Amino acid sequence: MAHSQQHRGTGWIVTSAILLILAGGNILINGLFALHANATISQNPQVKDTLLFSGSNLDTWGWIYTIVGAVIVIAGLGVFVRAQWAVMTGLFAAFVGIVLSFFWLFTPYWPDALISILLCGLVIHGLGRYGVEDVDAV
């Protein structure tokens, strides 16, 4: 009976891990693009004055996105082996993703926000239901 319990929810875990890897990869690529496109963006006066943190370059955002994306990709890989730190990191990342997506609901990008909320919700369900180890089972 214990052997069948170990494989319970494997589909949800794999789906959650793949979604985390894809989301993290997207964030990582955006960060690397921001680091690479810094010279182009900083020369554009319309964009230059609207940047948060630093109006003269995108380095700050580029490094933030690159680091966060790498952490989420590593967490997604860790979810495959059900590492608890990776599960907790994935849950936190999906929760933050939902919160940030709510800010986009009343913009022209609302369909993207709904899709993001749905995918983050699937990750939270999969990791919350099947990824977290049951303390009583030990």
Image (tube, helix red, strand yellow):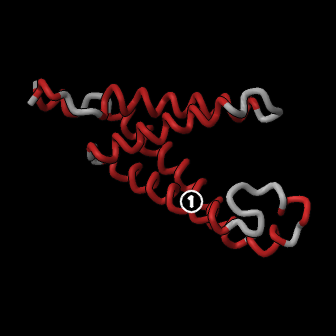
Q: Is residue 3 left or right of residue 9?
A: left
Quadrant of the drawing holding the C terminus: top left
Q: Position of residue 11 (x, y in %)?
A: 37, 33
Q: Is residue 37 left or right of residue 125?
A: right
Q: Quadrant of residue 111 in the image?
A: top right
Q: Position of residue 61 (x, y in %)?
A: 64, 60
Q: Secondary structure at mark 1?
A: helix
Q: How many marks?
A: 1
Please report the residue visible at 49 percent of the width from the left and 29 percent of the height from the top. Answer: 122
Q: Quadrant of residue 129 in the image?
A: top left
Disc 1 residue crowd, few under 14, some 14–19, many 20+, Cα 10 Å: few
Q: Foreground residue, 68 or 16?
A: 68
| Amino acid type assigned to the residue bearing label 1 in the image | Ile
Quadrant of the drawing holding the N terminus: top left
Please report the residue visible at 59 percent of the width from the left and 54 percent of the height from the top. Answer: 27
Q: Position of residue 36 (x, y in %)?
A: 69, 73
Q: Foreground residue, 42 or 40?
A: 42
Residue designated by label 1:
64
Q: Is residue 5 above or below residue 67?
A: above
Q: Is residue 14 above or below residue 99?
A: below
Q: Quadrant of residue 57 in the image?
A: bottom right
Q: Is residue 77 left or right of residue 81?
A: right
Q: Position of residue 70 (x, y in %)?
A: 48, 60
Please report the residue visible at 13 percent of the width from the left and 32 percent of the height from the top. Answer: 3
